[in-house]
Image (tube, grey):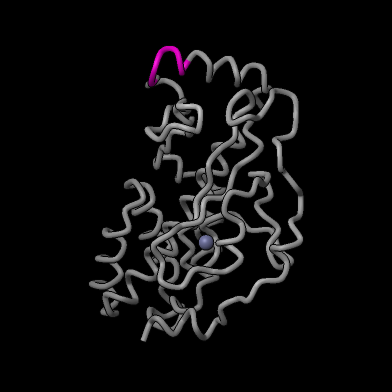
Amino acid sequence: MINNGFLNGLVQSLFQKGKSSTSQIENQAKPDTKGRSLPTVKFDPKRVHNPEMAANIRNNVQTIKCIGWCIGSENTKEVEAAVTRAAASGRNIKMLTDELEHTYGITRKCASFIACDQIEKATSQIAQREELALGLVYGRWVHGRGGKHPRPCHVKANGKIFKIAKGMFIQGRWVLPGMDINCRCIWEILLPGYQDFKVGTVPKGYKEVYPELQKCPERSPEFLYGILD
Ligand SMILES: [Zn+2]
């Protein structure tokens, strides 16, 4: 675990020197309100190969029911391997969509739905694991625009701060951005000393539980699976 002082020093030096190939923390192109580049954790897809991520991917594949419906539950091991390969190839949704479509003869729409869902989940879990290992604690929810049917709770969660280890408490359960079915939300990491987040404090505005996220109209599972038609 890296303490805040060390992490802040690391980030300070990165901002002075620019990108570092040896560090996992790098600058992002988008500046914050004060014109500084926001830090982000460098994503290394090769880190998908570990027992914890294998268990996560197994669970993710088992959780999405339409894999059983359109691919067949007897093929879940093969699907897990395909998801792992695509995640290790750098969040490769197209590669997984092509493989699912051609191997199992399912429609492009169904293959794309499963691929997006599985890769978003794996990406969130890899990011969580790496950020916790770096000693990062807080993230800010960024709602994934672009979907036709955004979840009202995820829209409300946009901009709210949560603990990366737990996720956001939404409708009675802890959830990370990108972990709900076909969720395209992501998060921004908060670094002590940046984004008005003072070293040794809790970031301004952080709440463990936001009451307004406990009651939102939610899409029904039928609606979610209905887009496979
Ligand atoms: Zn979402």
Q: Is residue 226 left or right of residue 55?
A: left
Residue 198, position in %: x, y? 69, 25
Membership of 45 in magenta stretch: no
Which residue is found at the position 37% from the left and 47% from the top?
Answer: 88
User: Taking 42 as reference, is 163 left or right?
Assistant: right
Q: Residue at x 43, y 59 (%)?
A: 145
What span is colored magenta in the figure?
A: 14-19
The N terminus: image quadrant = top right
In front of the other: 183 or 94:
183
Residue 103 place in picture, x, y as percent: 26, 72
* Residue 44, image quadrant: top left
Q: What x and y, as percent, mark residue 151? A: 54, 69
Rendered view: 143 above or below 70: above
Q: Foreground residue, 42 or 152?
A: 152
**Any magenta on residue 18?**
yes
The prevailing secondary structure element of the residues shown in magenta is: helix
Q: The C terminus is located in which quarter? A: bottom left
Q: Position of residue 32 (x, y in %)?
A: 48, 33
Q: Is residue 217 above or below residue 153?
A: below
Q: Quadrant of residue 210?
A: bottom right
Answer above or below: position of 194 versus 157: above
Instruction: Name the residue at 69% across, 23% down.
Output: 199
| Depth check, front residue: 229 or 22 | 229
